[in-house]
Image: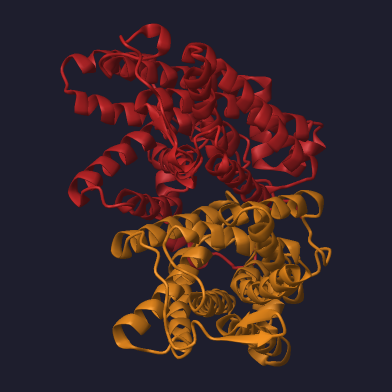
């Protein structure tokens, strides 16, 4: 029994680390622009499909397609922000407009994926997919471990980028006060595009590492967005360290509800925890502190 | 600093003559005499989702609380009468009211939990999806509710009005039409009632509404309950019409998407908006279904595209086109925007 609990805990933490990466893009976009990006789940799905088809059709190693997926999704995010979102952000009107627009983009992309690739669940089988490390009675799956590592690496480099580089400081300045940033000569629309692009690239990276151990089909998009939201809310919207902890919590909750209740309704546990946090402490564990 | 949004009710600028409304109703009433059952079924969809759009409009439009979880109420409304009928043979005419009551209770629970703890704006939108998804997973895993395979409503020996079953589909056409007219009347009354005015004030600015002494919590709860109860009626009608329900069909996000998109495309905070939106999107969906075949998602893809374009170019929806000011504002967006300073972006 202790073995089972320990095993569940370890795999929950590893998967949770990968989920944390999934929430990063959402977090950044919220932190800088206060846009809830509903299209995030669709970006993730696209990242997963790029990795999948890259391997199946072209034989690209999943980890090599990580930068490819990131670049493609960065371009998509940049374009989306520039063409659709930037023009309406200057307007004083219905505050839900940005949410509805990204919602529309999400419906479009997910159903496009459904139309093109169908509802069949697809999984990768490559050299590392069955590899595992045995530690005593606990089995650690290599793709999950690598994913965890990539996630940590990505978060650390984002931290470095935001805190230490000039561009990162410009992003943080814009988040604090866009008017002030504009007066200091920062190109605010460009910063918005860059932020959205980085957010999309982050979801592409998350899609790639999730693809190495999960199945993909367009219907999982909604579950993934909600999960990413849950992670962000638990760890305070806009806070990276918080999101990482939130990811670990959600990973563990999911793993335990799969083992203790039923694998088919493991998402229900995640939603219930999400609702509890949303209701009791909507500002998250870091009490509303960004960065 | 709080900047108050201007009062933008396109409905004020557009007065639809009573004669036009009356002749439209008469036209809709005699239409089944001249058309095939295919047209009836398309129009049934348009009326039903127009009705649901109007229900959503009460809380999502006037109340300004963007709910993406209305599938919860639709599902409860569909399941309750069905379960009562299949297990105990209770007529859906009674079940529909039980379902409506349960929807109100569910709305009380959801509203109390969400609004009590101050879930505002985006957070309420997220929370509402989670409520609907929990209900979906529950229905999927519950044996009593038929699980993933759903429930087939058995046909009684002879079709009878008492069991909400008819030998042909045209009675459903008239029931849906009545529902639609009923929702339009309810919205009309709501709009000029005290509750409706409070809700509109709340939708424009919660802080301002609070500061003039409106009990925000109470207004939100009442409007949500009204909206949920009506949505439940729609769920029952749908279940009796299709005669089969499963969790993904009635609790799935697609139901909420249909309601939100049809209402927003037509124009929120109006009566004509959700109806016109439903007419246009219903026809568009039918065209795409017939040209793409029944490929999953083709028509929803078009919905997404239309939603983005409408929110972008016509913030007041298609009804906003009738309002001259809205027309100019919508189409001149690109020009005006280039001159806007970036600073004044957020209204709190």
Which quarter of the figure has residue A172? bottom right
User: Would residue A183 be visible to someone looking at this image?
Assistant: no
**Which percent across, then down, holds residue A161?**
66, 89
Q: Is residue B331 above or below residue A289?
A: above
Which residue is at the front of the view, A95 or A240? A240
Residue occupying the point 61% across, 55% down: A267
Which residue is at the front of the view, B107 or A120? A120
**Which percent across, then down, holds residue B52?**
47, 31
Q: Which chain is orange?
A: A
Q: Which chain is red?
A: B
Q: Assign the C terminus of chain A to one quadrant of the image.
A: bottom right
Which residue is at the front of the view, B94 or B194? B94
- Report the colour scheme: by chain
**Which percent across, then down, holds residue B214?**
78, 31
* Left-right relation of A88 to A245: left
Numbered label tally: 0
Q: Assign the N terminus of chain A to one quadrant of the image.
A: bottom right
* Left-right relation of A144 to B299: right
User: Would residue B94 be visible to someone looking at this image?
Assistant: yes
Residue occupying the point 63% across, 24% down: B102
Q: Is residue B119 above or below residue A105?
A: above
Which quarter of the figure has residue A256? bottom right
**Which percent across, then down, holds residue A275?**
71, 50
Q: Is residue B135 above or below residue A124?
A: above
Which residue is at the front of the view, B242 or A195? B242
């Amino acid at each position: 029994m202790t073995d089972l609990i320990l095993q569940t805990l370890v795999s929950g933490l590893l998967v949770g680390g990968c989920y944390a990466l999934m929430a990063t893009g959402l977090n950044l976009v919220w932190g800088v622009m206060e846009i809830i990006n509903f299209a995030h789940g669709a970006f993730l799905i696209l990242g997963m499909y790029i990795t999948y088809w890259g391997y199946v059709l072209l034989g690209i190693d999943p980890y090599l397609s990580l930068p490819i997926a990131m670049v493609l999704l960065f371009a998509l995010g940049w374009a989306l922000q520039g063409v659709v979102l930037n023009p309406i952000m200057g307007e004083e009107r219905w505050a839900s407009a940005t949410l509805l627009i990204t919602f529309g983009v999400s419906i479009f992309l997910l159903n496009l994926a459904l139309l093109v690739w169908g509802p069949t669940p697809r999984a990768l089988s490559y050299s590392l997919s069955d590899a595992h490390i045995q530690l005593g009675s606990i089995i650690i799956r290599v793709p999950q471990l690598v994913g965890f590592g990539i996630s940590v690496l990505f978060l650390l480099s984002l931290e470095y980028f935001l805190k230490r580089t000039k561009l990162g400081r410009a992003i943080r300045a814009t988040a604090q006060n866009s008017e002030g940033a504009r007066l200091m000569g920062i190109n605010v629309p460009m910063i918005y595009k860059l932020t959205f692009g980085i957010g999309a690239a982050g979801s592409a990276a998350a899609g790639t590492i999730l693809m190495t151990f999960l199945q993909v089909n367009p219907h999982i998009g909604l579950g993934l967005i909600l999960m990413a939201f849950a992670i962000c809310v638990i760890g305070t919207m806009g806070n990276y360290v918080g999101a990482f902890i939130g990811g670990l919590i959600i990973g563990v909750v999911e793993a335990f509800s799969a083992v203790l209740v039923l694998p088919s309704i493991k998402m229900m546990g995640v939603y219930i925890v999400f609702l509890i946090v949303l209701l009791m402490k909507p500002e998250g564990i870091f009490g509303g502190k960004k960065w | 600093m709080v900047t108050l949004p201007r009062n933008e009710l396109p409905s004020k600028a557009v007065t639809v003559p009573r004669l036009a409304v009356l002749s439209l109703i008469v036209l809709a009433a005699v239409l089944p005499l001249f058309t095939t059952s295919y047209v009836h079924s398309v129009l049934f969809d348009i009326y039903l989702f127009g009705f649901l759009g109007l229900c959503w409009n009460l809380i999502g439009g006037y109340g300004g609380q963007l709910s993406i979880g209305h599938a919860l109420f639709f599902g409860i409304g569909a399941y309750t009468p069905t379960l009562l009928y299949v297990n105990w043979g209770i007529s859906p005419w009674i079940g529909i009211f039980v379902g409506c009551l349960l929807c109100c209770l569910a709305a009380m629970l959801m509203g109390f939990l969400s609004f009590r703890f101050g879930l505002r704006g985006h957070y309420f939108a997220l929370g509402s999806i989670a409520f609907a998804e929990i209900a979906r997973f529950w229905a999927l895993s519950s044996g009593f509710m038929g699980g993933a395979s759903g429930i087939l409503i058995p046909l009684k020996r002879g079709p009878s009005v008492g069991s909400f079953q008819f030998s042909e589909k045209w009675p459903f056409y008239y029931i849906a039409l009545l529902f639609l007219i009923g929702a339009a009347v309810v919205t009309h009354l709501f709009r000029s009632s005290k509750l409706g005015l409070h809700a509109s004030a709340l939708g424009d600015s919660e802080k301002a509404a609070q500061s003039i002494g409106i009990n925000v919590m109470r207004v939100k709860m009442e409007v949500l309950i009204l909206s949920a109860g009506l949505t439940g009626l729609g769920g029952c009608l749908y279940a009796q019409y299709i005669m089969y329900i499963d969790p993904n069909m009635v609790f799935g996000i697609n139901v909420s998407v249909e309601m939100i998109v049809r209402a927003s495309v037509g124009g929120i905070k109006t009566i004509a908006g959700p109806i016109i939106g439903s007419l246009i999107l219903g026809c568009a969906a039918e065209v795409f279904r017939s040209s793409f075949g029944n490929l999953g998602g083709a028509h929803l893809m078009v919905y997404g595209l239309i939603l983005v374009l409408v929110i972008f170019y016509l913030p007041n929806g298609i009804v906003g086109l009738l309002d001259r000011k809205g027309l100019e504002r919508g189409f001149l967006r690109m020009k005006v925007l280039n001159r806007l300073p970036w600073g004044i972006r957020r209204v709190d």
